[in-house]
Amino acid sequence: MEEIRQMSREEKLKKLEELERELIRLRTLVRSGGSLENPMQIRAVKKDIARLKLALREEGYRV
């Protein structure tokens, strides 16, 4: 979390967009019958998204 707080707002927004695309890709893979190398990967991406959103809200940015 400390690493995220040190990022600039633009970096956080870019990372958030990147993680949201990754989550969509992982969910699509699972729904199409594929299997994940690490089943906890979706959960980890969701937690990272939540951390980024929290850090943005702390700065007063509405997400």
Image (spheres, rainbow, N blue to C red):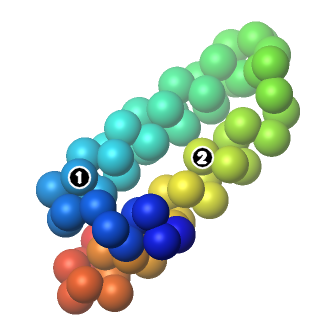
Q: Earlier in the sequence, mark 2 or mark 1?
A: 1
Density class for disc 2 (Cα within 10 Å; few <14, some 14-19, many ≥20) is: some
Which quarter of the rendering shows the C terminus? bottom left
Asked if 39 appears above or below 60 in the picture, the reply is above
Q: As shown in the figure, which amino acid type bears the numbered disc 1?
A: Glu
Whole-percent x, y for residue 36 in the image:
78, 21
Q: Residue at x 49, y 57 (%)?
A: 49
Whole-percent x, y for residue 20 in the image:
43, 43
Instruction: Tell me if residue 53 can be seen.
Output: no
Question: How many marks are shown on the rendered structure?
Answer: 2
Is 31 in front, or is 2?
2
Give SS at disc 2.
Answer: helix
Is 41 in front, or is 9?
9
Which image quadrant for residue 42? top right
Give SS at disc 1.
Answer: helix
Density class for disc 1 (Cα within 10 Å; few <14, some 14-19, many ≥20) is: few
Q: Residue at x 72, y 49 (%)?
A: 43
Asked if 28 appears above or below 12 in the picture, the reply is above
Is 40 in front, or is 11?
11
Q: As shown in the figure, which amino acid type bears the numbered disc 2?
A: Val
Instruction: Tell me if residue 56 can be seen.
Output: yes
Q: Give the residue number, with chain letter if any, for mark 1.
A: 11
Asked if 54 appears above or below 42 in the picture, the reply is below
Is 52 in front, or is 23?
52
What mark, if any, has residue 45 been given in the picture?
A: 2
What mark, if any, has residue 55 been given in the picture?
A: none
Whole-percent x, y for residue 19 in the image:
44, 42
Whole-percent x, y for residue 53 in the image:
40, 69
Which image quadrant for residue 10? bottom left
Q: Residue at x 83, y 33 (%)?
A: 39
Q: Residue at x 52, y 25 (%)?
A: 25
Labels 2, 1: front one: 1
